[in-house]
Image (tube, coloured by chain):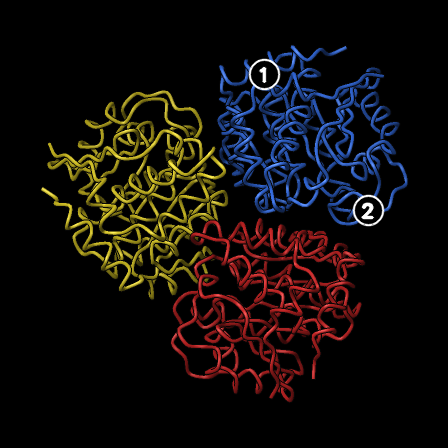
Chain colours: A red, B yellow, C blue
Amino acid sequence: MIKANQITEALQKLREKSPLVHNITNYVVMNNTANALLSIGASPVMAHATNEVEDMVGIASSLVINMGTLSEKWVEAMILAGKKATERAVPVIFDPVGVGATVYRTKVAQQIIEECKPSVIRGNASEIMALSNTNVKTKGVDSTVSSNAALDSAKLLAKSINSIVVVSGETDYITDGERVTSINNGNTIMAKVTGMGCTATAITGAFAGAEENLFVAAVSAMAIMGIVGEMASEASKGPGSMQMNFIDQLYKISTKDIEQRLKMSYE
Amino acid sequence: MIKANQITEALQKLREKSPLVHNITNYVVMNNTANALLSIGASPVMAHATNEVEDMVGIASSLVINMGTLSEKWVEAMILAGKKATERAVPVIFDPVGVGATVYRTKVAQQIIEECKPSVIRGNASEIMALSNTNVKTKGVDSTVSSNAALDSAKLLAKSINSIVVVSGETDYITDGERVTSINNGNTIMAKVTGMGCTATAITGAFAGAEENLFVAAVSAMAIMGIVGEMASEASKGPGSMQMNFIDQLYKISTKDIEQRLKMSYE
Amino acid sequence: MIKANQITEALQKLREKSPLVHNITNYVVMNNTANALLSIGASPVMAHATNEVEDMVGIASSLVINMGTLSEKWVEAMILAGKKATERAVPVIFDPVGVGATVYRTKVAQQIIEECKPSVIRGNASEIMALSNTNVKTKGVDSTVSSNAALDSAKLLAKSINSIVVVSGETDYITDGERVTSINNGNTIMAKVTGMGCTATAITGAFAGAEENLFVAAVSAMAIMGIVGEMASEASKGPGSMQMNFIDQLYKISTKDIEQRLKMSYE
């Protein structure tokens, strides 16, 4: 059972260490991802050339693989980097964006899981259900079902591949197949800002680069996302200002904010 | 002759259906395009791998092809997706960014028009004139002439390829070669925000994914762009806040805003 | 010795000419780079296809090469464009993002310098030290040392390749190997916004496209970056609003702002 102080301590570790997070991610979110990582206190680097990803992951504290806008050469780089990371015990965080939407995406997601052995997988409900072969209708990269519908799939997936699985949505679930922690923070407008899920995955990478207990890292990331989302939404007039305020709040979030706002429960 | 209520109805259809818009677009604008589509009520997906574009367009309501940062592999994907879309009667919206600036761009634009048979083409005056072989000096991706100078070219082009052609500028013109509808909303600061034209094309894709009358869809998109641009500019201090406020206003625009602000005329 | 009025005159030239700046840059910053160039008064174009870069640089006033997210095909385009630019006497501005972090990056940076003969190189302290073979620990794309630690390396580098070298940091240094001009404007929050260095390089490209004296162009760019950064930070709550306000202020900066705020010195 995770306690609030473990989250505040994990954030402190992150800000002290400023871990280098190597991202192989999609074109849509790169700018926001980099800004989110800088704001929370990490040091982001984006590199995808097969000529250098192994070198880059060699100096990184975590690796984030996000297949939002995948293509063959990029997948090759993801696999190379992921294998090297696993070899070096650098945690790999995987975001299977849009898995289930096309045959190719599903094949690639399975290949990445098999070859890179991610420590944490974060997706929306549709994606997690597609990954655990649950029958689900996908619609591009947005989820068609609520996160609690995917909880059983998440547990099964976590157990079968020995990984932590995060389903994000109105409630966020973090499970290792046995334990389930849920976070009830956040605001619906987050779904109207592109790449919020990708940001959650990157922030998980930031925590995983500084906090050895990866379950705590994953819970911390989702708690921060939800609380920052709540605080940012209160200052926003729409998705545009929400995107901006989210970055400002990530930079400013304090121990007190976490203590006052955290809505966490266990199963 | 399009009426204001056709535009408000098209917007309602868009928001109810939340069409999946498949974008093969340029690196510069992907984040803004995705946010604009989410804010107006559509569901964006960006996918460009030749391995998956046909599958993706197979679940989409419209396809937006934008050649802003083109290269061979991407053009191959555009053609594959465009052909599949035409085969499935999914409307193809084409943005010939920078056509005329290089020989390669002009060749690719012509190839896309021939092979993908776009339902709507949107460009600035320079681009539309370059496409219809009118002699015009181009300067990268920004127009060197005003939109009304390109109206004859737009009509000719629309007739010759049996498509709707949109010239955006201070006045936006929408023509099928016979009818011309013009929109006089907007604000000059829109030209100082990168990718506003690309956003217009994507929003046209959103409307085309929900409104069967594609002329109404194109007019609606340009009307919304202009009105939202006006409203956003009133709240902005420069191009940075303009970019943010534009997304907020796209999210909030109401029937009343359209009725009060629309400046539409016919020829 | 550069005078303040040379900077204000250079800005006026830039706004009058609105030079076309051809960028071959990284995915993370493309949107911001384009917006920064539009806001300061230039006309940006992004093009990276080997099929067209020579044509594009043929109509451009300057070429900005930024290797933030490099790969083989892109490097090939950078070299092609850079050679063509040099042949046409179009100034080449080079940003060696992350040089020293991987063997591949270092090799590519050296190749670009040799083959494209950049007129100006801008980097952070770690990057400039890595380029001049000074022993320095790199950490991805963020600097690990302060800018003054790299001043000697910058001078050596400038002399050895006959180029202007800019080291940005708390103090910005501009040197041709003999002269050193330093700018003491700016704010620490600039380091929390991704791609501020890349923006500095692009703005240098904008000035170099309008001001024939490239030393004046480089000093002007760094002065504008610092002053705009200061003004934007005063209006910002965090890195998100900073990114937005920076673009607004680039658009609005006046002769008076420069005269009142400029902190420039010489060695």
| Left or right: A81 as drawn, with respect to A194 | right
Callout 2: SS: loop
Callout 1: SS: helix
| Left or right: A153 as drawn, with respect to B126 | right
* Residue in the foreground of this view, choosing between B232 and A23: B232
Q: Residue furthest right?
A: C135
3D distance between C-alphas at marks 2 and 1: 38 Å
Name the quadrant of the N terminus of chain B.
top left
Q: Looking at numbered disc 1 in the image, what kind of residue is underneath it? A: Thr
Q: Position of residue A80 (x, y in %)?
A: 69, 63
Query: Are tags 2 and 1 found on a single chain?
Result: yes
Q: Residue at x 86, y 46 (%)?
A: C137
Question: Which residue is identified by label 1?
Answer: C255
Please report, as a chain letter, where disc 1 is located.
C
* Disc on the earlier residue, 2 or 1: 2
Quick check: can you spot residue C227? yes
* Residue in the foreground of this view, choosing between B47 and B166: B166
* Residue in the foreground of this view, choosing between C80 and A32: A32
* Residue in the foreground of this view, choosing between C17 and A47: C17
Q: Looking at numbered disc 2 in the image, what kind of residue is underneath it? A: Thr
Q: Position of residue B244 (x, y in %)?
A: 46, 44
Quick check: can you spot residue C70? no
Residue B10's tag is none
Question: Which residue is identified by label 2?
Answer: C138
Asked if residue C124 is positioned above or below residue A170 in the image, the reply reads: above
Q: Residue at x 49, y 68 (%)?
A: A105
Please report, as a chain letter, where disc 2 is located.
C
Q: Residue at x 56, y 20 (%)?
A: C254
Q: Residue at x 48, y 77 (%)?
A: A147
Asked if residue B240 is positioned above or below residue C179 in the image, the reply reads: below
Q: Position of residue B32 (x, y in %)?
A: 45, 47
